Image (cartoon, helix red, strand yellow):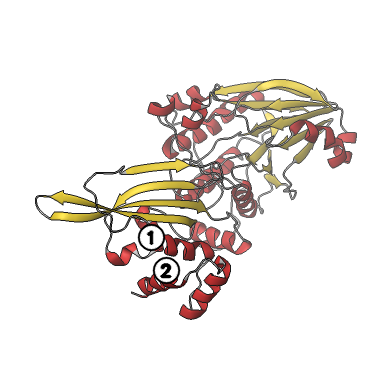
Amino acid sequence: MRSIEITKWIKDNKTKDIKWKDFTDQVNEKFGCDLNVNSVRARYNSGSRGEGKMTDKKPKESETTYNEDGSRELLRILSLTDAQKESPETIMSELGYNSDNWDLINLTINVWQQNSTEQGKTNLYQVKAKLKPKANVLTKEDLIEINKRIIEANVKPLKLTPIKRDKEQDPDKLLVLSIADFHFGSYANKIDSGYDYNLEIQRTMFRNLIEEVIDKQGLIKAGELLYVIGNDLINFDGTNQTTTKGTIIENCSNFNETYETVLMEEIKALKTLREYFNKINVIVCEGNHDRTLSQTIYLNLKTLFENDNSFNFSEDRKKTQAFKWGLTSLYFDHGDKNYKRLVQQLSNIFPEIYGSTQYRHCLLHHLHSKEQNLELNGIMTHRLPSLKPTDKYEFTNAFISEAKQELFIFDKNTGLDNTLTINAKTLLKKKRSDLKWQTN
């Protein structure tokens, strides 16, 4: 009843000469609450137009408009009690939106009268609402709480049995695996785009990719692996499941399920890969979808494997990364900003690595498709394709490309030795049981 009382007072006392901010302060002071301007405005507008105007004409029952700024405009038919009708927070819940993650910008309620044999005339409400996702900011405290929920305690290093080094592996060879734009948690279906993509398929493709890399390592026999984490590994970057910037996207699973899946699959992958390389170097390269979560995944893995000398985790967590391998310098960036200008500046960003190497390569991601290599400022650029299949948005906008993963092999003395391609269709068809995955 208190919510009804507040709403009634707002409607009775708001005048044009009072600014919304000042009026909100008055409301909070009178009722001892902590409403924001948007909530007070929504209460004022609720039921202010169309109530009492009965009609037997059935209006639209459902409509959703997605705006470029991330906001959504909804039209729904709801069955509401008088108390629910006066509470914007309750209406948001009935619409399927959490007020912790969304701001209610505007709300209009129109009444519609329905005739039925059993109940006679009953009132339904046509609700028009505009909502916008709250700023997607994860604080340090938020991240700690997330990690506690997933790992059930403070992250502790794993106790792994040391492995015997393979003397047949070539200490001059480096295999580079940068999984580009995998988008765990994203969604696609055959009806909209011709492809299915969900969390179960993503698990299968990810594991099969690791197994395919191990198959190829049996022939390559590289002494070390450079493993790159990030580059839109996860489709979203927070509990409200938008990109880092706040763009609304379609997902197949909730935050906890997706995050836990990614973290656990990465742990299993690294524990398995360590059996096939004498050393694994790990760096993080954040994407535009998962800038925060890619860093969080990386820090968890770094802590878990810190006591195992099979791994070398970089202390550098800048957006752009560099790695030196003999006479070769490797640079990594998601490539979502002006990449040509970035490449021109790499000699200034990493002067020591750039100046001490003869062969220079920059691996870029983001576009989900391979582009022709360009040489800029003495650096060869490579735009990596993605294993992710086409979704509805990409299909509608004709962003269609062959789904595949590239591997790079570098020699300490001669630079780029070879590139290998793994096709997504191969991974979906791949079945094997002889590889012992390290799950404990």
Give the answer, above or below, for where 385 lies relative to 265: above
Q: Quadrant of residue 142?
A: bottom right
Q: Residue 35: where, in percent of width, then height?
A: 50, 69
Q: Which residue is mark 1?
A: 48
Identify the residue at image location x=26%, y=55%.
Answer: 79
Identify the residue at image location x=33%, y=62%.
Answer: 85
For the residue pair 305 and 263, the one nearer the viewer reads as: 263
Q: Which SS class for mark 2?
A: helix
Q: Quadrant of residue 65?
A: top left
For the residues bearing labels 2 and 1, Cβ distance under 8 angstroms: yes
What kind of residue is marked 2?
Answer: Lys
- Residue 233: assigned label: none
Query: Would residue 440 be seen by someone viewing this image from the given angle?
Result: no
Query: Would residue 397 be seen by someone viewing this image from the given angle?
Result: yes
- Residue 11: assigned label: 2
* Side of 373 where 138 appears, left or right: left
Identify the residue at image location x=42%, y=60%.
Answer: 45
Are there few (<14), some (14-19), or many (20+) residues within 10 Å of tag 1?
some
Are there few (<14), some (14-19), or many (20+) residues within 10 Å of tag 2?
some
Measure the C-alpha gap from mark 2 to mark 1. Answer: 9 Å
Q: Residue 399: where, in percent of width, then height?
A: 55, 25
Q: Residue 362: where, in percent of width, then height?
A: 75, 31
Q: Residue 282: where, in percent of width, then height?
A: 68, 43
What kind of residue is marked 1?
Answer: Ser
Q: Which SS class for mark 1?
A: loop
How many badges with numbers are in the image? 2
